[in-house]
Image (cartoon, rainbow, N blue to C red):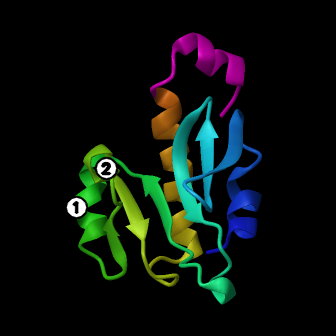
Amino acid sequence: MDSTRLRAWVGNWPGVTEDVKWGNDLVFSVAGKMFCVIDATPVADGGSGRLSFKVDDDRFLELTDRPGILPAPYMARAKWICLAEPDAMRDAELKPLLRRSYELVRSKLTKVKQRELGDG
């Protein structure tokens, strides 16, 4: 996964913003609440390409039992996973999980804020 492709997938969802935190991590948020993070350093320049995002509580253990998928550092308690290997998950599975991460975070916003964002 790379930041350009991730940006194309999630960047147009209602209320999504991006910024760089912790050096070179590209963070995608909805209404200021993070829903996914990627190491934006190009792999050719020593970046890992690691992608972390929130998952449903009941999927956390299932997903982290798979090769190449770890509990996300510092965020595992909030049920975030980390794709430590680029081929740990196919796009067809990853895209809906990223969308679900967005929905999980968005659902915790106030109803007023959710209405302001429009259809998600």
User: CB under 8 Å between callouts 2 and 1?
Assistant: no
Residue at 71% of width from left, 24% of height from top? 118
Q: Residue 21's x, y, as percent?
A: 59, 51
Q: Position of residue 60 (x, y in %)?
A: 28, 57
Is 114 magenta? The answer is yes
Please identify the residue farthest to the bottom as the structure is shown. 44
**Residue type, mark 2 in image:** Lys
The residue closer to the viewer here, 11 or 58, is 11
Local crowd size for mark 2, using a 10 Å CA cut-off: few (<14), some (14–19), many (≥20): some
* Amino acid type for the residue under numbered disc 1: Leu
Dot 1, how many residues are within 10 Å of its Cα: few (below 14), some (14-19), or many (20+)?
some
Tell me the quadrant of the picture where the N terminus can be found: bottom right
Q: Residue at x 49, y 47 (%)?
A: 101
Question: Looking at the image, is 8 positioned above or below residue 64?
Answer: above
Residue shown at the point (37%, 80%) measured from the top left: 68
Counting residues from the N terminus, which is met first, the one under dot 2 or under dot 1? 1
Query: Based on the displayed image, in which of its 4 quarters is residue 31 positioned?
Result: top right
Where is mark 2, residue-wise? 79
Is 72 or 54 nearer to us in this picture? 72
Residue 35 image point, x, y percent? 52, 46
Find the distance from the CA under tag 2 to the CA under tag 1.
9 Å
Q: What is the span of residues highlighted in magenta in the rendered image?
A: 108-120
**Residue pointed to by mark 1:** 61
